[in-house]
Image (spheres, rainbow, N blue to C red):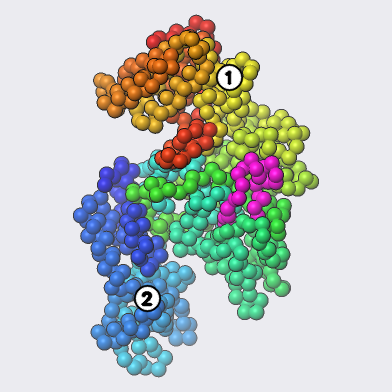
Amino acid sequence: MAYTPLDEKIVSEFPGNVVRKDLSAQLKSNAPVPTYVLEYLLGQYATSNDETQIAEGIERVKAILENNFVHRNQAELIKSTIREKGSKLLIDRIHVIFNDKDDRYEASFNNLGISEVVIDSATVRANPKLLTTGVWCLPRVSYHGTPEPGTSPWQLESLKPVQHSGFDFDQYKKHREAFSSEEWIDVLMQSIGLNPEFFGHRQKLFQLTRLIPFVERNYNLIELGPKGTGKTHVYSEFSPHGIVISGGDVTVPKLFINNTTGRIGLVGYWDVVAFDEFAGRTKRPQRELVDIMKNYMANKSFSRGNDVQSAEASFAFVGNTAHNVPHMLKHSDLFSELPANYHDSAFIDRFHTYIPGWEVETVRNEMFTQGFGFVVDYLAEGLRHMRNLDYSLHTAHLFDLDKSLSKRDRDGINKTFSGLLKLIYPHEQFTPEQAEELFIFAIEGRKRVKDQLCRIDSTMVQPRFLYLNKTSNQERGVQTLEEAEYPTLYWRDNALQQENLEETPVTQGTVGVAQTALTPVDTPPLEGRVEIRENQTGVTYQGLFADYLRGATMIQLEDAYIRRAHQGRNLLDLLVVVHSVKDPAEEVVFALRSGSDESGGFTQEQEEMFEEIKNQVEPLGIKFIYTYDSGTHDRSIKCNNGWIIDLGIGLDMFQRPAWSQYSLEFSHQKFRKSRRVVLNYTFDANANVNA
């Protein structure tokens, strides 16, 4: 396979700590060990861009698993083999305790079922995780007959961890400096197994937000959305420090503490507890459980009886929605799928962010990466290390949140912002603009929670989600994408909507969308600026351009990137809009000036594409002319009716749709998710249009 420059860079910067992700996917179906163990082995034996070495490494990993892994149902057979042969190399999870009575460390083997095996102090010091969570290892175990009283017949001759037993954060930060922010985001995307080419920037941020519970203590995240978006993937396969449980199976003793035994529950042993299938109106969780969860999510502590306990586990709640966004906004709220006992304003107010699952792409086979990413256990240890750090103070000299925001609002924003900084900028090197992008994203996540609370609880006061950029001294407002797409449904009454709009004026700095340009109206077109949000739907060329093309008999499109098949499809869609607004009795000259991957002219594929488009539209009264210009950089539409439209990123303003004859988003623009686009409309009666 062909490796990208990013693959080459990550292999060079992090040797031994990366793996080609499709290899672990290939072996996972038959591998008896967790993904992080499998990837560690692949990272040791199959980290190369040489296909021969990779093939040899895969066979070596298969042989290690086949010959050395301890299956519980074969434990007695393996013990017998060790006794008869003297020793054997195994793969098992080993946990160590300190026996203070005999002043020694003792190992227990999870699958083999033996314990009290003496292990030397140097090995324990080199692998401290043996004393906490336990470590998957390659131990060589021998048997020495009847032991002396108080000793085990089993002896540990050697031990090699097959998990990372330590993590060098300074080296991690040093090598991070070799990557741009976009490259690093793509490295993280590939590390969780996804091909970044299929995701827009906002989509990538949603995927990374799922990781925040691993880098932030006591972080509470909720994600509700359609099925098939991979909500639980990172919690079940990404880290040995996270656990997924069914939302309907959780109990107070299991999650917090068992009063009978005094044993602490899951929150005392895991960094992240994820609740799968959390949604469902018919579920009836215990009221006591909800009350203890509320206290823990707010105060990091819980109590049963007289004892108060504290823990650091973060919570991630994931569930499916049964209705689309406008239906939920019209009939209830965006938390409508929660069980009745959880559909409680005090419980919901504990969430730091809400990932809108309806914006997250449904996972398709082609979305999985074949590129290199971090061995998940290596990255998991890095994320766990960063739980000890606090990056939220990086906002202090850059931004001021509006005083109407509550402490919980501020905590939610700051913890999300801190988590994203740790993930993307662990080396703490970023520009004010890069920080502002993440700060806005963090505000939107908390605003989605608070705005819905104001719908659920009419006594709650709507705060102003504004912030002051101290660098520019400009106050800016933030909107959720749902608010921009469905303004008449988003607010519980028109008075509140008007109040919010007055407090969040649409200015150049506002993270909002001008709605008037998205839907044709009977009023004359106006000059102005339109910002389209990433992931926004309902955007069409008809709505954006029709009124401005009306009456033009000569139209010039300048766009350097009409090169691929989907870009040619975009061009054809624009020509359909031209046909819809032209006088049937008149002809329109449409001139395209574009570039190519080749120097000196168009490629053969482009020529064939343009000729086919020309033949399609000529019977419609549109004369299509195309010319090559290697110096074309601007992206604009100029019309001889005086209108000039600055296209920003060009016609290619939609994310890649699913390639299927039954895909609505492929067939109709209004169902496609947009990329971020800024359009400027100006009128110049003397505009020079060349064809």
- Pointers 1 and 2 in contact (C-beta within 8 Å): no
Callout 1 amino acid: Gly
- Residue drawn at the location 36% of the way across and 57% of the way down: 25
Q: Residues within 10 Å of mark 2 (few under 14, many from 20)?
A: some
Residue 528, disc:
1
Q: For residue 118, what is the image quadrant?
A: bottom left
Q: Can you give x and y, in whole percent of width and height, for residue 195 in the image?
A: 39, 46
Q: Is residue 279 above or below residue 463?
A: below
Q: Is residue 583 magenta?
A: no
Q: Is residue 77 above or below residue 472?
A: below
Callout 2 amino acid: His
> In the picture provided, is 243 more to the left or to the right than 494?
left
Q: For residue 17, what is the image quadrant?
A: bottom left
Question: Badge 2 is on which residue?
Answer: 71
Q: Can you give x and y, in whole percent of width and height, for residue 393 in the image?
A: 57, 46
For mark 2, give the secondary structure. Answer: loop
Residues rendered magenta in the picture:
312-338
Q: Where, quadrant-wise, is the C terminus in this rendering?
A: top left
